Image (tube, helix red, strand yellow):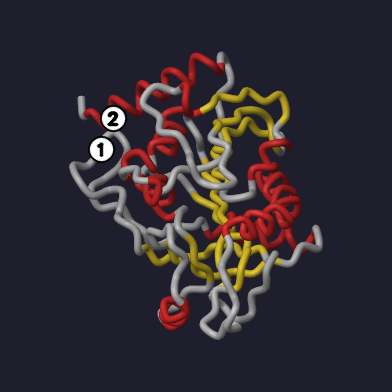
Amino acid sequence: MDPRAERIYNAADYVKQQLGLLRPEVGIVLGSGLGKLADKIENAVIIPYRVIPGFPVSTAIGHKGNYIIGSLGGKTVIAMQGRLHFYEGYSMDLVTLPIRVMKVLGIKYLFVSNAAGGVNYNFRIGDLMIINDHINKLPNPLVGPNLEDFGPRFPDMTRPYDPKIRTKAKEIAAEMDIEVKEGVYIAGTGPSYETPSEYKYFRMIGADAVGMSTIPEVIVARHSDIPVFGMSVITNEAHDDYAEDYVNDGDAVVRAADAAADKMTSLFSRLIESL
């Protein structure tokens, strides 16, 4: 067996043993400062990454590093309370390992979230942006021998973010009087924040928000034909016209994400309920 597949199945077997009869329908990835959604999961089973065979450990600010399995929106969900990043030094196989484990566990949908910089001049700190497409500047996680158990060699990426779920999300947001933006997410390797010239370049090529994650997870989910819904919380203004003393601050990003997390939590819960 391919050692990558062996790692996935071993980890999935361990998680299954902890879950008993529970079988998650929806996977959720919680980004920087967005872990409080996990507090809304009822009858939660918490599995730290560090105890799962072959699993790396999240080291990023605002990422606790747990699988949390339980009930949200009337569905059994499995949430990543903290993701893994390429900038932490992990290979793409490890960055996307938790998503493939979710696939083996049987998820039918994947919800991803992140904290992002607002490249679009119309975005403000605290805005929620439904991701309708992305631009990838990270290594593609499908490079290397194809894992035939999970999907085809050349998966289609015409609609990486499910149009029907996006439409439903906008309807629910309107019902709840939650303003949402919609746009294109671009991801680079990090961990340094981008320069003003890079922000300008991203805007010119069609990006609305920028971050350092999410896209590898989306690619492996779509490789396995799992519908994806993505949302960014705008935590800083990623512009090229800063004041002379402006500094991007990681702790401030987490605080801004935390402040917007209640709205995102309510929206995710209602949207999961509607599936």
The picture quadrant where one finds residue 45 is: top right
The residue that disc 2 covers is 5
Residue 12 rendering spot, x and y as whole percentages: 42, 24
Residue ID at (63%, 54%): 254
The picture quadrant where one finds residue 147 is: top left
Q: Amino acid at mark 2?
A: Ala
Q: Would residue 77 be found to the left or right of residue 161 on screen?
A: right
Q: Could you say which disc has been placed on residue 116 in the image?
A: none
Residue 192 shows in the view: yes
Residue ID at (23%, 28%): 3
Q: Would residue 75 be found to the left or right of residue 6 on screen?
A: right
- For label 1, count other residues whose C-alpha is less than 10 Å away and answer few (under 14), some (14-19) or many (20+): some
Q: Quadrant of the N terminus?
A: top left
Residue ID at (53%, 73%): 208
Q: Could you say which disc has been placed on residue 147 in the image?
A: 1
- For label 2, count other residues whose C-alpha is less than 10 Å away and answer few (under 14), some (14-19) or many (20+): some
Up the image or down, 15 lies above or below 173; here it is above
Residue ID at (42%, 31%): 101
Q: Secondary structure at mark 2?
A: helix
Q: Which one is nearer the viewer's eye here, 209 or 218?
A: 209
Q: Amino acid at mark 1?
A: Leu
Q: Secondary structure at mark 1?
A: loop
* Contact between labelled residues 1 and 2, with CB atoms less than 8 Å apart: yes
Q: Quadrant of the C terminus?
A: top right
Residue 44 rendering spot, x and y as whole percentages: 67, 25
